[in-house]
Image (cartoon, grey):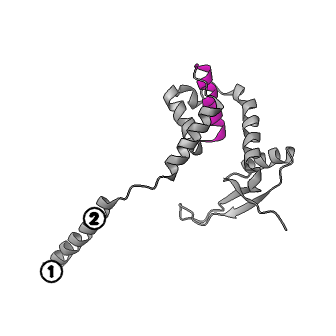
Amino acid sequence: MEPEFITYKKFNDIALANDLAELLDENNVAYFLQEEDLVFNPAFSYTDTKEYAVKVRPEDFEKINDLLKRDIEKSLEEVNAGYYLLAFTNEELMDVIAKADEWNVFDVQLARKLLAERGRELSDKQLKEIEEKRIEQLKQPDKPQTNWIIIGYLAAVLGGIFGVFIGWI
């Protein structure tokens, strides 16, 4: 039976997908690259827009994350002096680390390095705690928007009555 492959990451540029594929080849990680058409084109125009999904076995996710981190550590020394994260405060850098799911791996690693250079190095235990706290935050359901729902129904009813009144006149 063929092992199940699931999407690890999607790219809108084939070159970026090929970079990840090359890293996986170098480290003998099984994967396949799938070209996908976008279901919805926000521009409402005909364009040849595609996404490229790199699919791997679920048990390889951690290994790939480690490979990417090691690969990125090599390029952290060559950061351009105008890179936007260099202007971030310590609090902003901590926010990058705390919400790592919203940032790319390079930015998270650079934020860790910058904090360490500024005397605020984080241990693996602290990073694990931050990650667990973020997962708990993401598990929380959104608060119900009952006020907006009520306002919406009132606007529909009042707007309907107003429309009938204008039509009558």
Q: Where is residue 168 in the image (x, y as percent from the top left)?
A: 15, 80
Q: Where is residue 63 in the image (x, y as percent from the top left)?
A: 77, 45
The image quarter in which residue 32 lies: bottom right
Range covered by the magenta-colored residues? 103-119
Q: Residue at x 71, y 25 (%)?
A: 77
Badge number at residue 168: 1
Is residue 56 in sight in this rendering?
A: no
Q: Mark 2 points at which residue?
A: 150
13 vs 103: above or below:
below
Q: Where is residue 25 in the image (x, y as percent from the top left)?
A: 85, 48
Q: Which residue is drawn at 69% across and 51% down?
A: 13
| Closer to us: 139 or 101 | 139
The type of residue carrying mark 2 is Ile
29 vs 41: above or below:
above
The type of residue carrying mark 1 is Trp
Is residue 168 in sight in this rendering?
A: yes
| Closer to us: 81 or 127 | 127
Q: Where is residue 20 in the image (x, y as percent from the top left)?
A: 76, 47
Query: Which numbered disc, 2 or 1, marks the residue that appears first in the sequence?
Result: 2
